[in-house]
Image: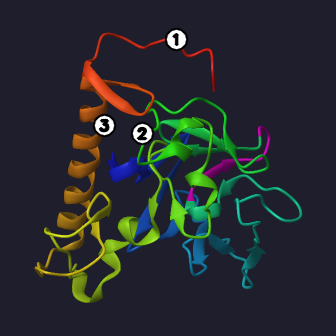
Amino acid sequence: MTLPHGQILTETTGASTTAYTYGLDRLSAATSEGVTTRYVHDGRGSVAQAVVTVPNVSIPSVQSYAYTPFGEQIGLKASGFGYNAELFDAATGMQYLRARYYEPGMGRFGQKDLLRGTANNPLGLNRYLYVRNDPLNLVDPSGMEACPQQTVKQAAFPQGAVVTSEKTTQVGPMYYTAITKTTYYTPSEAIDRYYAGEKARIENHRTTTSSGGMNRGPYKGPPDTSYA
């Protein structure tokens, strides 16, 4: 059972079950053995601290994390939720971003993007590139599309109200540069609208093929991909 973008609600390993609690971010994790981990996030949403409380131990342990702009952990690498609050595996050095795995140490994805670049987005022609080389302003929770941090965090508006516009330049799915029309959405409605826009964009790419950044008619299978 998951939230959008595969956020985990519960997981079971052997006889142990861990349940996660969410607000606007992942707030905590509690195991069936009574161990509770509370997550403290920094300004961009990465896990800055994990406060672990163990039964019969009065003082909780605190694990602190810091990252480079591309998300590599500074100091000892630890598995778990970290950069942009996404799941990181210290053994492989890879971060799980749904469609693909991202390697923070290299600042690149480990697999090619499913979508090709266009004339309006030439950086997308490098199909291993992470967030167009702009990790300070962009995120890519799906592994397929760089988008502004605000796009993912739209539910952070007070009382769950999201202000959006339907008539201005689109920067990313459900994010616009100016407000000509104001609509209020609950957090769940905002998330649903964002992913509906992303799904439509992906389907559009699947029905057309790209050649030199220009759409050339019905999709007839992948062209030669010997280049990056």
Q: Which of marks 1 and 3 is in front?
A: 1
Q: Residue 100 carries which label?
A: none
Front residue of this view, candidates 225 and 190: 225
Tell me, yes or no, whether the highlighted magenta stretch contains residue 91.
yes
**Identity of the residue drawn at 61% across and 79% down:** 42
Q: Is mark 3 on a helix, strand or loop?
A: helix
Name the residue that disc number 3 marks: 202
The disc at residue 118 is 2
Q: Mark 1 points at which residue?
A: 224
Q: Kindly identify the amino acid type of the residue bearing the numbered disc 2.
A: Thr
Foreground residue among 168 and 79: 168
**Residue situated in front as seen by the camera: 89 or 95:** 95
Which element carries disc 1, helix, strand or loop? loop
Residue 154's quadrant in the figure?
bottom left
Mark 1 → mark 3, Cα distance in angstroms: 20 Å
Please give the name of the residue rendered at 58% of the width and 77% of the height, measured from the top-left corner.
41
Q: Where is residue 152 in the image (x, y as percent from the top left)?
A: 39, 65
